[in-house]
Image: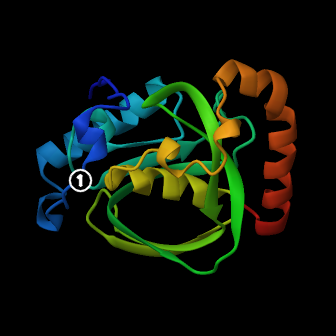
């Protein structure tokens, strides 16, 4: 449909809790257009995911997809997933350190602690209710996008302020070691 402007950190919409989507309206043109706009905008920006409020739509929706993404060559593949009115439950206290960036926080990365085992419940783009467990590194993407819906960006969750760096510095000094860290997680968890 359309590639939208991605709101940047400091925009009040990104700091606010998004509103639930009326489940009965999922098949309507407006909601379907929001979904298409999120997908188009995410793909255009080479993102792994994007939430509706990042493109100016204050509702509890996001999309995720990881194929051969040049920004995230180490991330496990994830098919296009449309998520509406999600709920996340942490299944254990097991965590890992995720080095994250965000389309709304340009040219920055830092370390965030994320749960390794979660259960997700949501509606898909057809209005079907879905429930699944997500384990390992892929759980990070779910938690990152879910945070957006509550007005939380990754800098709000940073565990070590010394880990802040630019994308260029990450690629130059940290990406190889971080990719090994992700590879170890994927070998244990499968995703």
> Residue 179 appears at what percent x and percent y?
81, 41
32 and 191: which is toward the camera? 191
Q: Where is residue 123 in the image (x, y as percent from the top left)?
A: 32, 66
Q: Quadrant of the N terminus?
A: top left
On screen, 37 above or below 123? above
Question: Residue lying furthest bottom in this view?
Answer: 91
Q: Which of 15 and 122 is in front in this view?
A: 15
- Residue at image point 47% right, 30% down: 105
Q: In this view, does 23 lie to the left or right of 97?
A: left
Q: Is mark 1 on a helix, strand or loop?
A: loop
**Crowd around label 1: few <14 · some 14–19 · many ≥20 (10 Å):** many
Seen at 44% across and 51% down, the residue is 145
112 and 24: which one is in front? 112
Q: In which quarter of the image is residue 57?
A: top left
Q: Is residue 191 left or right of residue 100?
A: right
Quadrant where the image shows the C terminus? bottom right
Coordinates of residue 112 in the picture (x, y in percent): 62, 51
Residue at image point 58% right, 47% down: 158
Q: Residue placed farthest to the front in the image?
A: 161
Where residue 111 appears, as percent x and y from the top left, is: 66, 45
Residue at coordinates 58% horizontally, 28% vertically from top-left? 108
Residue bearing mark 1 = 18
Q: What scheme was used to colour the molecule?
A: rainbow
């Amino acid at each position: 449909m359309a590639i939208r402007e991605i709101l940047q950190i400091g925009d009040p919409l990104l700091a606010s809790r998004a509103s639930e989507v009326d489940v009965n309206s999922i098949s309507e043109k407006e909601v379907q257009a929001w979904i298409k706009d999120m997908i188009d905008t995410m793909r255009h920006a080479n993102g792994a995911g994007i939430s509706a409020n990042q493109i100016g739509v204050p509702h509890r929706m996001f999309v995720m997809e990881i194929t051969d993404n040049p920004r995230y060559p180490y991330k496990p593949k994830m098919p296009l997933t449309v998520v509406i009115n999600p709920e996340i439950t942490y299944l254990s206290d097991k965590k890992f350190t995720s080095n994250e960036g965000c389309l709304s926080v340009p040219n920055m990365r830092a370390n965030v602690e994320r749960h390794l085992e979660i259960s997700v419940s949501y509606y898909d783009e057809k209005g079907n209710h879905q429930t699944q467990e997500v384990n390992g590194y892929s759980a990070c993407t779910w938690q990152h996008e879910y945070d957006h819906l509550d007005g939380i960006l990754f800098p709000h969750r940073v565990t070590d302020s010394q880990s802040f760096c630019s994308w260029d510095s990450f690629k130059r000094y940290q990406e190889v070691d971080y990719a090994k860290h992700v590879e170890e997680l994927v070998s244990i968890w499968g995703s």
